[in-house]
Amino acid sequence: MNRKADKPATAMPFDPGRRSFLAGTAATAGVALAPGIFLYSVGASRSAEARALDEAASSEVRWGMLIDVNRCDSGCNDCVSACVTENGLQGHGRPATDPQWIRKIDLRDPNTGREQSLPVMCQHCDEPPCVDVCPTGASFKRADGIVLVNKHTCIGCRYCISACPYKARSFVHETLEDQKSYAPRGKGTVESCTLCVHRIDDDRQPACVEACSDTGGGAMLFGDLNNPDSEIARRVAQYASQQIRADLGLNPAVRYRNL
Amino acid sequence: MRLNRSAMITIAVALALFASLAVVVTAAEKNDRTMSEVPVPAIPQGQGERCVEDTDFMRRNHMTLLMHQRDDTMLQGIRTKQYSLKECVNCHAVQGKDESAVSVSDPKHFCRACHDYAAVKIDCFECHSSRPEIDAASPHDGLIAEMLKE
């Protein structure tokens, strides 16, 4: 058991399956792994709780989301409106260019007629193509897995928009006023879902997740995928879940159940 | 012809100099804020006792502090309040006619009052809010006031 825990560090430093392997075997390997696991679980289910204001985001954490498609109603738009309100994403009545950090997608299986509805936002990939193509380094992945645009260095070239297979990014075309003080946005830069990074750093949940559990179907679960004791890690270890376009090998942090 | 022309230019320059001198003198006379010879910017007073660093230091170095804070917060998620732009805006809010704080479109805005005078142009407020927004949900409010009491 010890051999197993030690081996991946040298053999395959980037094995994305390693964490979930550890999480999945935690129950059986309890004794040997107990000290390490205990360290993780001190911060309870929300590791950010332990993070002080002057402490940098840690790569021990990987923020993610699990969305249960069965609980998502096609008529419900609460996650989208919560996002718009939280981040001040006022549109101009131009659907083609208005900002869209999260959107609802309705699917229909033509063979069976089965219909499903799900929210899609930045999938916060482990291997984000938007980061690969950015010429200034403005598109980046924070230590805790959140994929962001550093608008201070974004030149608005929009390569990242083309590179994203999830169509998750928008471009600001208009001069803006009255932005939220915690969500600065401005003309000429690219933007996308930040997982509400200002809330995460304040030990709160993303606005969409909060709205979904308050008034929606309770389909969205947010948490630390790396913490084997967190609700989200336990659920992905226990039940089948999938990533959209998993074939691309980007290992998104947003996962779906019953899709 | 040539002589005439240069003479005319000399007279024109002398006149222009005289006129501008007159303007400077009246400006200095009108400026009753101080008895100094140069006009000084009217910088609104911040709230509280003092700034996050010595006032002199802030005048010279606020841009460096802000740029560092910007990178720390953006790239690493460090959310200390001392040099946060949000906090500058909160504490340096200037009341407008309608009781609410003025935005940077008003020349009385704290940052503008000085930058207009010094001919500095910043783009920060194209994205950042130039008015305070009391974020009731944040448990960390009042931290700076607390810190400065010590």
Image (cartoon, rainbow, N blue to C red):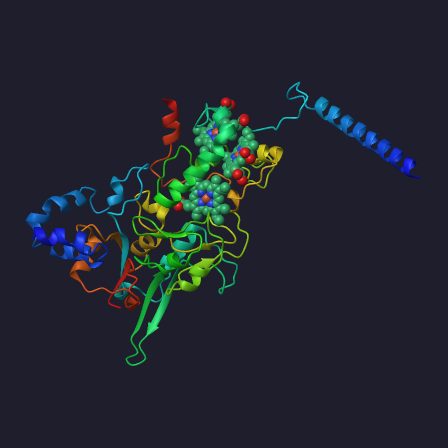
Who's the residue at 31% across and 54% down the image?
Answer: A209
- Tag count: 0
Residue B120 placement, left or right of A81: right
> Where's residue B77, x and y in %?
35, 43
Residue B144 sits in quarter: top left
Of residues A230 and A62, the one nearer the viewer is: A62
Q: Residue at x 23, y 58 (%)?
A: A16
- The residue closer to the viewer here, A254 or A211, is A254
Regarding residue B45, the answer to whether it shows in the image is no
Q: Identify which residue, A240 or A33, lies in the foreground.
A: A33
Say if A12 sits above or below B88 in the image.
below
Residue at the far right in the pictured view: B1
- Compared to A149, does B139 lie above or below? above
In this picture, residue A158 sits left or right of residue B28: left
Whether residue A15 is visible to the viewer of this picture, yes or no, is yes
Say which quadrant the C terminus of chain A sits in.
bottom left
Q: Residue furthest front?
A: B2
Residue A79 placement (x, y as % from top left): 36, 57
Q: Which quadrant of the view contains residue B148?
A: top left
**Residue A139 horizontal/vertical position (percent):** 40, 53
- Compared with A107, A225 (above or below) is above
The image shows residue B7 at horizontal and vertical percentages of 89, 33
Q: Looking at this rendering, what residue extends furthest in the bottom direction? A: A111
Residue at figure coordinates x 52%, y 61% from the top left: A93
